[in-house]
Image (tube, rainbow, N blue to C red):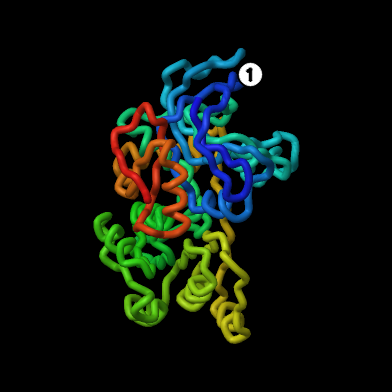
Amino acid sequence: MNALVLHGIGDLRYEQQATPEPQAGEVRVRIGFCGVCGSDIPRCFVKGTYHFPTIPGHEFAGTIDALGSGVERFSVGDPVAVFPLLWCGKCHACQRKAYAQCSDYDYLGSRCDGGFADYVIAPVRNLIEVPQGVSLRSAAMTEPAAVARHAVRRAGEMKSGDPVAIFGAGPIGLMVAQWVRAAGGDVMLCDIVPEKLEQARTLGFDKVFNSKTGNPVEWIESQTAGEGAAVCIEAAGVPATMIQACKAVARAGCLVLMGNPSSDVTLPTTLISQLMRREVSLQGTWNSFYDPEAPADDWREALAAMADGRLQAEHLVTHDMPFSQGVGALEMMRDQTAFFSKVMLRPDESASTQETFR
């Protein structure tokens, strides 16, 4: 098979690998699409994976190509999304079915081979069937959609009309915004990239603010009669936006930290005092809730929302590239030589769009 293989930090190569074979309880998935996560950029060019060589990529969907022994719930040809975290099943978190909190987990695309390849091996327990009407390109965004759903869930019960400020209008931020809208919240989006704000407008969000041209905290106050946002969700991972989110949250409001911090964040004493006096709730969020035995979880909700139109995933795709152009695509994202939102990679045999990054 063809794959994008990381041989070392900054050493990403498009090359041939042996096609893997599924073992008992596993399936081989023929990749339809694999999204490039923002975390894939430092993983490939700065930090590396846990060992080399590794095939990155953890946001993917495809069709089942082969079954290992003992697999009965799925058939060859079934369209599936894949929960990429491989939990141990033994630790305290796993006993509570909090699999994303597993203390001894593996992970497709960072600790073992992932979806930047024609095929990937996954345990059958990690598969979710893609419902009718949802394309594989949309289904490849189930992972970020589930992560966004989980972040909104962490904010607690949302009343209709509650003002919700989202800092960061990247793919995750825009998915958060769609979940908030579906819950009845009044969405306010802040970012410094005009193209991202324009993308938000095309999704129907009219309360958007360019933080490069003004003070987002003052703007949020102007939208809420000086009260601030009932919920602030920090989805950028930038120290400045984390501080802005702290300042913009209302009394008895909730602050959700979602973005992976790019560097240390220092909170002034006065701001900490304000958070205490306002009795603000601080919630961390990581990954998503997935349970193969539950009738509903973040993953199934995400796919259901794609099917009924509450979540418009494909509108976020700005680039659709074959794996053979994947190195250039990731370098473009690293160097920010073009505007991008969600970048999709796919096997060359399914190539329908030809773009070349120079």
Task: Tell me the amino acid under the disc marked 1.
Answer: Gln
Quarter of the rendering containing residue 260: bottom right
- Percent across and percent down for residue 88 are 70, 35
- Percent across and percent down for residue 33 are 41, 35
Residue reaching furthest to the right: 91
Q: How many marks?
A: 1
Q: Who's the residue at 65% across and 40% down the image? A: 111
Q: Who is closer to the viewer here, 340 or 336?
A: 336
Q: Who is closer to the viewer here, 159 or 177?
A: 177
Residue reaching furthest to the bottom: 270
Q: Report whether residue 59 is seen.
A: yes
Q: Report whether residue 97 is seen.
A: no
Q: Who's the residue at 38% across and 59% down the image? A: 337
Residue reaching furthest to the front: 358
Mark 1 residue element: loop
Residue that label 1 marks: 23
Q: Residues within 10 Å of mark 1 (few under 14, many from 20)?
A: some
Q: Who's the residue at 49% across and 65% down the image? A: 234
Quarter of the rendering containing residue 271: bottom right
Q: Who's the residue at 37% across and 76% down the image? A: 212
- Percent across and percent down for residue 137 are 36, 37
Q: Is residue 316 above or below residue 255?
A: above
- Percent across and percent down for residue 81 are 46, 33
